[in-house]
Amino acid sequence: MPNMSKSDLLSAIAESADCGKGDAEAVIDAFFAQVVGAAQSGDAVAWPGFGKFSLAERAARTGRNPQTGAPVQINASKSVKFSAAKALKESMNG
């Protein structure tokens, strides 16, 4: 299955919104900046019918080097998690 490139996505959004690709990119960049900022503050960003972006915290843990089997300490980390809304799941499966 081919992937949609950033350029392809921006062209499709610009066409759908009847605006220029530069404007579409500015809006998408602003959206992602808000999602990152909210996650850094511990807030979630929800878009009804689509899903929710939230902070995911992983605790420190001990892993194993797959080649040697030696224990390796894995530091705690933070990431952004996306949870799909019920309506999005249903549109993908129905």
Image (cartoon, rainbow, N blue to C red):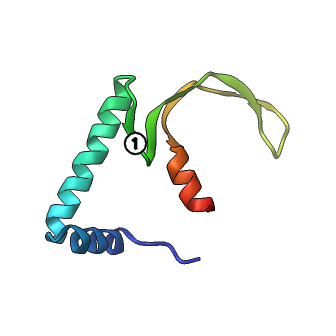
Which x, y percent locates residue 72? 72, 30
Q: Quadrant of residue 15?
A: bottom left
Taking 15 as reference, is 58 above or below it?
above
The residue sitting at 49% across, 35% down in the picture is 79
- From this viewpoint, which residue is outermost toward the right? 69
Left or right of 27? Residue 55 is right
Residue 69 in picture, x, y percent from top left: 85, 37
**Quadrant the C terminus occupies:** bottom right
Q: Please tell me how crowded label 1 is: few (under 14), some (14-19), or many (20+) other residues with Cα within 10 Å.
A: few
- In the image, is residue 15 above or below residue 25? below
Residue 82 vertical position relative to residue 89 in the rendered view, above or below: above
> Is residue 92 rendered to the left or right of residue 51?
right
The number of discs equals 1
Q: Secondary structure at mark 1?
A: loop
Query: Where does label 1 land, which residue?
Result: 48
Residue 75 in percent (x, y) is at 59, 26
Closer to us: 15 or 21: 15
Question: Is residue 62 shown left or right of residue 75?
Answer: right
Task: Name the amino acid type tagged 1.
Answer: Pro
**Residue drawn at the location 57% of the way across and 52% of the way down:** 89
What residue is drawn where x is 14% and y is 62%?
Answer: 23
Q: Quadrant of the N terminus?
A: bottom right
Residue at image x 45%, y 33%?
54
Choose between 52 and 66: the one closer to the eye: 52
